[in-house]
């Protein structure tokens, strides 16, 4: 199909200093924790986006010197000449598809504790190091400032040698030295680098100028700048110093890459920023102050929104990290008139969570993300079926839907049976929660694709038992029947049901979604620590209930620190007037009353009254069908449980498992084999 002419503007080339982006699709720097530890995986990950039509592909943060390194994570590194071949892998791969390659040079200063190099971090003024490391950063001398300038220049020259077209200077996310120079919180210097804004901007101006002089003949120099920190007067604001900085440096960089700080604001989840383009109020002014091209982000997945950003003069280039992760082929799909094939980001930040845990990237919507080199997975291509066999998938949640779709893509004849009247499984429930409607994209994308396929038969309202499955005489059976929340308190803190549980009738989240009556004061016991407990608390509060959330952890929804949501969730619950009790567990329950105790000492006990008790603790696999079929294993060529039925987890894990099962069907490959394809350090 041909591209709709209204999207032509997105495919116009854009000159950026001495280079030209082939179109307006710009993958801004984003972490993937492949980096210098897994260079071939890194190159493959970026190359697939170039193949998918992104005109510019950038690295993640790249350390320029050992005095600022981010162990234990693996991002980029360009300390010296020896790093260049790794970068060449990426730039060559990206250039093969006609895209430009950009490198984000990073000096993190007091954001990093230098756990590998053991060099004391430096900061504009002496300060503590980010996080809870009991070490501090020393104040930079003039000599240090000269060093940092030189290190940027040397790294820029190496970048040019490595084949990069765009070299970034970085001041954002509250993670970089140059941004710290802007902020009085870090910069209390009394020399020409502190005090007035002009002085606090001096080092950035010098470095931008130095880098342009060094490589500007061949490479564009980009400046990544957070215009606002959403901290009000306690931080940088776009209306005042943010604006002034853009004005002062307006024409120096060849490209402005603008966003908001910190990372939790820049990569806000759908739960807290449901709309794409949410950064526009803070960044739209930039184009009025510079003639240079501007790129910005905002979880853009709609081609119409992108066009509107360009036409209204908000941005010149459509920046994307997460939309390019969820669908590396987004530009090509717009170009080919296949808008409905775009796999839209849902704004869940599972990708971010991997980075927070120092683990390679993964994505809820795109199970091939991070697996491009390790398993040779391509987001748009899959191995053809090796037989004419039919396949049965039982259960149409995220695992079953993805499995059925990929089996159909392989060319198998697929039967998908679902017990209820709708596809989607848990998605249909979870997308009802406040701010989570975009999660429905996991279902909707797959349902749409499946319904286009002639080799897929979908049967709703079909709850299959073992005899039903066997009667179909389909040789390959994948069981994706999901899981149910437990309501007996068993979870992380409790290996056994809590005392007195038989005297009350606690509700599980499934009961709540099924419409169980919730009365009066609600006590939620959250031993799950992801989104469900807090999201239900919000829902009950909105319905007018008194709500208390009790958790054995020291914070509400503590795992959501990884998705950058924890602070926001706790603040929202407090603002809603929800009682929060942390570091306590249930000891005993009876009708209307719970005895709780500190998780640290049983000497500290108290009681809580409730009308409704909701347990958000753990889930049990719904694997009766799988277990029943085990007795007839010899009648089936394939019998496998996938997704939550195999092991309850995130939606991302279920989608991945469904995808993996489809890839491996009749592959003859040991499912563990890809894990032994590793980037190994050369022992030279
Ligand atoms: P996952 O996250 O692993 O995909 P879900 O819980 O979201 O799991 O989805 C499981 C789906 O399986 C649900 O839609 C459920 O209705 C369906 N299901 C469960 N048991 C059966 C069965 N015996 N026959 C058909 N469908 C089933
Ligand atoms: Fe989007 Fe979630 Fe994928 Fe990240 S993990 S790119 S937020 S869908």
Image (spheres, grey):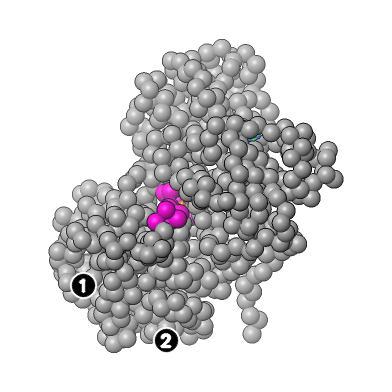
Q: Residue furthest front?
A: 454
Residue drawn at x 44%, y 83% is: 162
User: Residue 548 location in percent, x, y?
Assistant: 44, 25
Q: Quadrant of the N terminus?
A: bottom left
Q: Is residue 551 left or right of residue 159?
A: right
Q: Residues within 10 Å of mark 2 (few under 14, many from 20)?
A: some
Residue drawn at x 65%, y 70% is: 678
Q: Is residue 20 visible?
A: yes
Q: Is residue 381 above or below residue 147?
A: above
Residue indicated by mark 1: 292
Q: Is residue 474 left or right of residue 683?
A: right
Residue drawn at x 27%, y 61% is: 6
Q: Main secondary structure of the magenta part?
A: loop
User: Residue 366 location in percent, x, y?
Assistant: 51, 56
Select label 1 or label 2 by which is in front.
1
Residue indicated by mark 2: 161
* Picture disc at residue 277: none
Q: Quadrant of the C terminus?
A: bottom right
Magenta residue span: 339-351
């Amino acid at each position: 199909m041909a591209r709709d002419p209204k999207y032509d503007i997105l495919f116009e080339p854009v000159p950026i200093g001495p280079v030209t982006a082939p179109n307006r699709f710009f993958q801004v720097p984003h972490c993937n924790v492949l980096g210098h530890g897994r260079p071939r995986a890194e190159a493959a990950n970026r190359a697939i986006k170039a193949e998918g039509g992104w005109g510019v592909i950038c690295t993640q943060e790249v350390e320029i010197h050992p005095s600022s390194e981010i162990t234990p994570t693996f991002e980029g590194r360009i300390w010296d000449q020896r790093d260049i071949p790794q970068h060449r892998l990426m730039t060559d791969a990206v250039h093969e598809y006609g895209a430009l390659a950009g490198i984000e040079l990073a000096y993190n200063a007091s954001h990093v504790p230098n756990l590998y190099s053991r060099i004391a971090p430096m900061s504009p003024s002496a300060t503590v190091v980010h996080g809870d490391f009991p070490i501090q950063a020393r104040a930079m001398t003039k000599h240090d400032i000269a060093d940092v300038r030189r290190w940027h220049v040397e790294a820029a020259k190496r970048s040019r040698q490595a084949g990069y077209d765009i070299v970034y200077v970085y001041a954002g996310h509250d993670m970089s030295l140059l941004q710290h120079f802007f902020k009085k919180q870090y910069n209390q210097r009394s020399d020409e680098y502190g005090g007035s804004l002009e002085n606090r901007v001096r080092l950035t101006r010098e470095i931008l100028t130095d880098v342009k002089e060094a490589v500007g003949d061949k490479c564009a120099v980009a400046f990544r700048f957070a215009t606002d920190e959403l901290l009000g007067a306690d931080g940088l604001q776009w209306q005042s110093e943010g604006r002034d900085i853009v004005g002062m440096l307006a024409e120096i960089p060849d490209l402005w890459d603008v966003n908001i700080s910190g990372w939790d604001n820049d990569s806000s989840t759908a739960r807290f920023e449901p709309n794409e383009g949410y950064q526009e109020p803070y960044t739209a002014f930039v184009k009025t102050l510079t003639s240079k091209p501007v790129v910005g982000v905002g979880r853009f997945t709609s081609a119409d929104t992108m066009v509107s950003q360009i036409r209204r003069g908000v941005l010149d280039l459509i920046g994307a990290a997460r939309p390019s992760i969820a669908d590396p082929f987004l530009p090509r799909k717009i170009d080919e008139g296949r808008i409905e094939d775009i796999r839209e980001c849902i704004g869940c930040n599972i990708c971010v969570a991997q980075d927070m845990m120092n683990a390679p990237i993964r994505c809820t919507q795109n199970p091939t993300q991070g697996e491009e080199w390790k398993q040779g997975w391509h987001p748009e291509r899959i191995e053809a079926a090796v037989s004419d066999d039919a396949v049965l998938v039982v259960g149409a949640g995220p695992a079953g839907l993805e499995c059925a779709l990929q089996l159909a893509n392989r060319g198998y004849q697929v039967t998908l049976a679902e017990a209820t009247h709708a596809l989607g499984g848990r998605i249909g429930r979870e997308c009802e929660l406040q701010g989570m409607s975009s999660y429905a994209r996991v279902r909707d994308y797959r349902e749409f694709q499946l319904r286009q396929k002639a080799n897929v038969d979908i049967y709703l309202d079909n709850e299959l038992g073992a005899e039903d499955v066997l009667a179909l005489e389909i040789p390959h059976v994948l069981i994706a029947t999901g899981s149910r929340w437990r309501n007996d308190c068993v979870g992380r803190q409790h290996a056994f049901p809590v005392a007195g549980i038989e005297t009350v009738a606690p509700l599980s989240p499934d009961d709540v979604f099924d419409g169980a009556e919730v009365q009066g004061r609600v006590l939620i016991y959250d031993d799950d620590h992801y989104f469900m407990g807090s999201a239900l608390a919000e829902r009950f509060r909105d319905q007018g209930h008194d709500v208390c959330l009790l958790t054995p952890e020291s914070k509400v929804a503590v795992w959501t620190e990884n998705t950058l949501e924890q602070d926001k969730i706790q603040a929202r619950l407090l603002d809603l007037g929800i009682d929060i009790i942390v570091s306590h567990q249930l000891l005993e329950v009876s009708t209307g009353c719970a005895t709780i105790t500190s998780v640290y000492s049983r000497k500290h006990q108290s009681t809580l009254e409730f009308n409704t008790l909701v347990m958000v603790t753990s889930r049990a696999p719904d694997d009766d069908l799988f277990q029943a079929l085990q007795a007839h294993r010899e009648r089936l060529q394939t019998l496998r449980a996938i997704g939550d039925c195999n092991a309850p987890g995130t939606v991302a894990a279920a989608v991945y498992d469904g995808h993996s099962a489809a890839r491996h069907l009749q592959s003859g490959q040991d499912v563990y084999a890809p894990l032994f394809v590793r980037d190994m350090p050369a022992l030279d």
